[in-house]
Amino acid sequence: MTEKYEAVIGLEVHVELDTASKVFCSCPTDFGALPNTNVCPVCMGLPGALPTLNRRAVELAIRAGLATECEIARYTRFDRKNYFYPDLPKAYQISQFEYPLCSRGGVDIEVDGKQKRIGITRIHMEEDAGKLIHSEDGTMIDYNRCGVPLIEIVSEPDIRSSAEAKAYLTELRKILIYAGVSDCRMDKGSMRCDVNLSVRLNGASAMGERTEIKNVNSIAFVGKAIDYEFQRQIAVIEQGGEVFPETRRFDEADGKTHLMRRKESAADYRFFPEPDLVGFEVGEDKISEIKRELPMLPAERRRIYGEQFGVSATDANIITSHVLIADYFEKAARATVYPRLAANILLTELMSELTDSVNEKNTLEPSVPSSYLAELATLYGEQTVNSSTVKKLIKMIAAEGVSPSELVEKYGLAQINDGEYIACELDAVIKENPKLITDYRNGKLAAKKAIIGKVMARTAGRANPLILNDIFDNM
Ligand code: ADP
Ligand code: MG
Ligand code: ZN
């Protein structure tokens, strides 16, 4: 019964801008400070306190717009969005309604080998609200986050499945991290996502009534929330019911969405121009300057890895999973004539360590510096060492902090490429193990592996495995 329907999905993504101070005052934005220590009359909404706009926040918001191929508005302005809730002491949020800073952009995604562009309707600036902490004794409020600069990125209703939503969020997140806009930590709340979803019969052009699932806090949960909500709306319709515009929340424990309230509309917020801040124009030269400073984005890096370094699309995608890993790889790739081997070594031997480091500390402290990775690729590419020695060297670098060439020298780890020498070692092994060679001649293929293994052991893993194999086969 679900095959008759398709999902229509638009995402609203809130991202905390990576500024040192808040958007309308000079309070610090650092995460984890004691409650209500990063506050002042402006972000506490005390009467008479006036906002001043943080220039850096505007620059980062423009960066986000350029990185997602948006048009940057020449004229932009702030509006008041009025609502009463204790997390917002002013009883209004300074946001942008009529004149958002960026609009009409898009993000390219790929799902099941199919390319697709998800349109971005608009990106506007706004301020974050405080945090309510509920306990048995009552509710406490921490205003530290009040006034932290945010952008809200609103997508077109172009998304059709949970897979597309996850691909869009993954790519958007990457782009924003690369562009230096935000660290986009969904687990720490610096990136949050609202899901708007409706269903319609396949082939229908009109959109159905939608629900909005607020503040889903991981990409995986966005996928789960969509899958559940899609089925729920279909069931409602199939039972002759009606989907109402409502705000729902996703419960991680039961994997379902639950009704919170009927959806408010723009009119409920009584938007009007913020009288305490003047509208302003962003100059063409300012936009060009920000464009020049924009670091290279993941899509372009993936292209370069393929064209210049001979790295496959799949591998390039893994390496660009985080900007710090991509930067690390590029340094190594440019320092060796074997960049593809550097990619292979990185992926098989170092990726899990690097990923952990990035996820846990948001910095990269590799046990193998990029210059040593380049050296490893060169040593391997020139057949100075074989792959098992590469593995060994990586452990030794971590332990001794010495370059791979020095280690090869110091411990005599160079690969043995001398055919005669290898043939002698092979002879010796065969003489010592007559049964193995008889087994092999009688068709037991495992015996070959055993013999090769013994030769490798005799040469402390240094024999060139290709040469050894060749000699064995031509015996
Ligand atoms: P609101 O201000 O109520 O959140 P917006 O008009 O800004 O509403 O739209 C929010 C999001 O909802 C956008 O991402 C948009 O693409 C999406 N959206 C709008 N209508 C629908 C619909 N019928 N079905 C699914 N998504 C929708
Ligand atoms: Mg909304
Ligand atoms: Zn303040």
Image: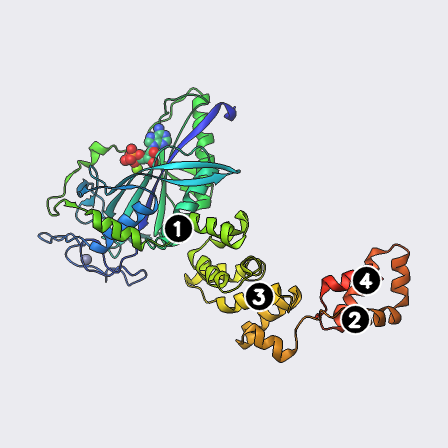
Q: Is mark 3 on a helix, strand or loop?
A: helix
Residue that badge 3 annotates: 378
Discs 2/4, front: 2
Closest to the observer: 270 or 84? 270
Q: How crowded is mark 3: few (under 14 residues within 10 Å), some or many (20 or more)?
A: many
The kind of residue tagged 3 is Thr
Q: Which residue is drawn at 20% across and 36% down?
A: 98
The kind of residue tagged 4 is Phe
Task: Examine the rendered structure and indicate whether residue 266 appears above or below residue 387.
Answer: above
Residue that badge 2 annotates: 420
On the picture, is 245 further left or further right than 472? left
Closest to the observer: 125 or 92? 125
Residue 472 numbered mark, or none: 4
Is the distance from the Cβ of mark 1 to the nearest ligand 1 atom less than 8 Å? no
Give the colour scheme shown.
rainbow
The percent coordinates of residue 215 (x first, y second) are: 36, 44
Disc 3 to disc 1, C-alpha distance: 28 Å
Q: Is mark 4 on a helix, strand or loop?
A: helix
**Is any part of residue 234 visible from this angle?**
yes
Report which quarter residue 7 is drawn in: top left
Closest to the observer: 68 or 252? 68
Residue that badge 1 annotates: 297
- N-terminal of the pair, mark 1 or mark 4, is 1
The percent coordinates of residue 312 (x first, y second) are: 55, 49
The quarter in which the C terminus is drawn is bottom right
The kind of residue tagged 1 is Leu
Disc 2 to disc 4, C-alpha distance: 12 Å
Disc 2 to disc 1, C-alpha distance: 51 Å
- N-terminal of the pair, mark 2 or mark 4, is 2
Q: What element carries label 2?
A: helix
- N-terminal of the pair, mark 4 or mark 3, is 3
Please state the quadrant of the image where ligand 1 appears: top left
